[in-house]
Image: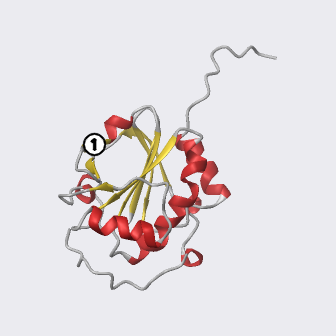
Amino acid sequence: MSAQRSNSARAQTTDDLPDAASAIEQNMPSPAPDLKFTDASGKPLSLAGYRGSGLVVNIWATWCGPCVAELPTFAAISQSLARNKILILPISVDLDGAKAVRPFYASHDIRDLPVLLDPDGSATGVLNAEGIPVTIIINPEGQLVGRLDGSANWNSAPTLALVRQLAGPKMDTSDVQPA
């Protein structure tokens, strides 16, 4: 990653961000990338371990101005999406790992998101991303179904509806009788 790791970007507010629903690129379902990361204690994790849940995976950093504006919008919707078995996985590329993320979460009153880390900075390469933030949406079958490069406001009714449509559990209609 060639970006300088300092927060020199202009601070943004949620009002400056486009609505994610209008910016998400919907994809034909394809295999999810083999993204590996850790929790705050260093336990290795991967997207495959979350199969069966819908996922909104955001690659971000505390030094990235657009990321700083965007992340609280994920925190605002995490509980609502969790009721639909959709998890938000914010994966930080900060070099200082949890030592950078925990104070950021505390200062932004973020309590409902896990501290997840990309200690070797490989996530952007795995996702063929030119920068951060980048967000991917994975359905419960483990397929990539959406992507957004750049920051957006995820805390809107249209975005929640689209994420639920893309990543939520599919209704079993096999026993539905025609009217």
Q: Residues within 10 Å of mark 1 (few under 14, many from 20)?
A: some
Tell whether 39 sits left or right of 161. left
Coloration of the structure image: secondary structure
The N terminus is located in which quarter? bottom left
The C terminus is located in which quarter? top right
The x, y position of residue 165, in whole percent, is: 59, 42
The x, y position of residue 94, in whole percent, is: 26, 67
- What residue is disc 1 on? 45
User: Which of the pair 151/97 is nearer the observer?
Assistant: 97
Identity, as a three-letter code, of the amino acid under mark 1: Leu
| Residue found 55% across the figure and 66% down from its top | 153
Farthest left residue?
Answer: 120
| Residue found 67% across the figure and 13% down from its top | 175
Which element is circle 1 on?
strand
The x, y position of residue 163, in whole percent, is: 56, 48
The x, y position of residue 3, in whole percent, is: 24, 75
Is there any visible trace of residue 118 in the rendered image?
yes
Where 137 falls versus 94 (above or below)? above
Where 6 falls versus 177 (above or below)? below
Dividing the picture into quarters, in which one does residue 46 lie?
Answer: top left
Is there any visible trace of residue 150 in the rendered image?
no
| Residue found 33% across the figure and 41% down from its top | 47
| Residue found 37% across the figure and 70% down from its top | 103
Where 122 falls versus 27 (above or below)? below
Where 156 falls versus 50 (above or below)? below
Tell whether 105 sits left or right of 22. left
